[in-house]
Amino acid sequence: MTDSEIIRDDEVFLRMNLAERLQHILLILSMGTLMLTGMPLIFSEFKIFKSIFAFGSAFYVRGILHRIAAVVLIVNIVFHVFYTIFTKRGRANFKEIAPKFKDIKDAWSLFWHNVGITRFLHNRGVGKTFFARHPALLFEKEPEFGRYNFIEKFEYWAVAWGSFVMILSGFFMWKVELSLKLFPLWVHDIFVIVHGYEAMLAFLAVIIWHMYNVHLNPEVFPMSKIWLNGKISGHELRTLHPLEYRKILEGRKAALQSSGDADTPAK
Amino acid sequence: MTKILRIIVLSAALAAGLAAAPAAGGPSNEDCLACHSDKDLKSSAGKALFIDEAKFKGAIHGQADIGCVDCHADLKAVKDFPHTEKIKPVDCAFCHAEADAAIRKSVHGLPHPENAGITVSCKDCHGTHEIRPKNDADSSVYSINIPDTCERCHLDRVQTKRGGEFIQRYNQSIHYKVLTKSGLSTSATCATCHGSHDVKRVEDPDGRVARKNIIRTCGLCHAGIQRNYLEGVHGKDYVKGSADVPVCTDCHSEHAIQGPEDLNSVIYSTRVAAVCSRCHDDERLARQYGFLTSRLKSYASSYHGTASKFGETRVANCASCHGFHDIRVSADPKSPINPANMSKTCGKCHPGAGANFAKGKVHVVEAKAESKGSYVAKVLYIIIIASMISVFLIFIAADLYRRAKKRVRS
């Protein structure tokens, strides 16, 4: 049996189960609301926010919505933590998404592979002996990723760090009296500054990095549907997550072998 | 009772005046009314010459039994009726010398270069045959009626320097509202601030609304506020004759004065910062008096300021923390922003505010020296954001470049 028979290109794999998709949707909703209701405070000179928040108690309602969204985000995070600790799949995912040195190497080699400057020089006959000694520097091949590539890992840990910073600073901004009971004013001022800038960082990261990787990237344009149906095809698995693909393949091959001389391998 | 007393006094004064005057007597009121009680009596120019006897009798001069010719003195000697059409204007000064003297020194009595041809006489405000005393609710100079009386000329026909619209603003003011709607007859009318017979231009240093006198003028009614004001930094410099410090009208406006809760008020919670920064963001004043500008900027970038911009009134404006009439420097132990008083001041909105509220600078631009922590956090974040976004963009560009190249090749 060939590899393409063991994992057919049109076979469907589950990349995000219902719980994971729900966590992602809750994250979209809460983060979206937090950004929409928080941004007027940073860009208070923008006409659009002035016209949105023109009616009497608009500003008050904005604050309430922001807090509700914050609670949803916190609940979502608690949900995610419990899911990660107490389910087998959660623990497996976490192991996969944990940062490794390979991720930095992957980012580095993917970038130089994309730029292709060393291959260009090599083709022109520059540094022949040097490249003969260090063929890796030609970055001929794209790095191969497992279940989560360095981009996805970065986004995950960025959300984790960002949420921690935002929840901590936001909590003390919400409970300003408590904050000032514990800290001097200048510390509280830092919470306020950090909350605003971290929000901008998160906003820009989502708009630029995440939007490119899951929407605008020609590979998935206009949108990767994984977040809706949770499905990934055998083909996508093989091309985008080759290490995971091979792991599954090896597993199935071993299963085939252990089933001995059976004519019809069980799936 | 007082009315009766007044009449007696007036009559006595009049009798004394008459005794001093030559050629007493002349035509009686009945003689005059023989013709002037005719409702259709008109001058050749068509002006009605009817005198309502009942109304005249009810008016102050009628009650005091003053005869027609006591005022129309040139008719005293007339024997043949009807008399000539042209008669001399009434000279009120004959009895009201004091008011006359005041008028002559007022804007109404002095030549008006801008309004040449317009002269103001007693009757323009007080009326003629039906003059009533100023405490009579039907009088044209009764407090509640004064705005109408002044505006009869000043809304339209006789424009003052800032125009009728400026005068009209008074009719939206709290003073006018309580005067007319609530009938609080002691509320400020035109005459309360500008004076009555002694109305002066605002530039005239003797005028009641002159910058030099405005504190006293407003203090006539707002005595407590006047005292507070004089204790504050603004008031202390005002007494020294500074032309830079704000007086009542600089913050409250002149005619359009509203309570701070009124949405249209210039000192409505969300507008206070704009009012204060008119002076406090001024570079010249800042240099001269040694305060920091960009306070508005730093306030506006705080949560208080931002929320205020969106119309939220539950947040602090300048006055919430600094006070208003008796604003004091922070070193003053009585100042609400003195470090010792901060927890009380902040505690008005943030219950349980402790000493930590004073540990840090309030609304300063995040500058190195002013608030190190915020400054460092801000700079760090700007560096992180800038480098992160650059890396993202470079990565994306490299990715798109490779894809484009692949497409060209295939």
Image (spheres, grey):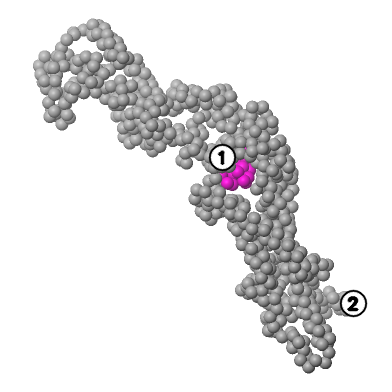
Q: Quadrant of residue B70?
A: top left
Q: Is residue A143 above or below residue B5?
A: below
Chain ID for label 1?
A: B
- Is residue B218 shown in magenta? no
Q: Is residue B255 left or right of residue A208?
A: left
Q: Is residue B201 above or below residue A142?
A: above
Q: Is residue B136 visible?
A: yes
Q: Nearer the viewer, residue A15 or B115?
A: A15
Q: Amino acid at mark 2?
A: Arg
Q: Magenta stretch mostly in which secondary structure?
A: helix
Chain ID for label 2?
A: A
Q: Which residue is mark 1?
A: B273
Stretch in magenta: B293-308
**Pointer 1 and pointer 2: residues touching (CB < 8 Å)?**
no
Q: Residue at x 38, y 35 (%)?
A: B171
Q: Amino acid at mark 1?
A: Ala
Q: Residue at x 17, y 30 (%)?
A: B47
Q: Position of residue A49 (x, y in %)?
A: 55, 54
Describe the element under mark 2 as helix, strand or loop: helix
Q: Quadrant of residue A37?
A: bottom right
Residue A133's mark?
A: 2
Say few, some or many: other residues with alpha carbon within 10 Å of mark 1 (under 14 / 14 to 19 / 20 or more): many
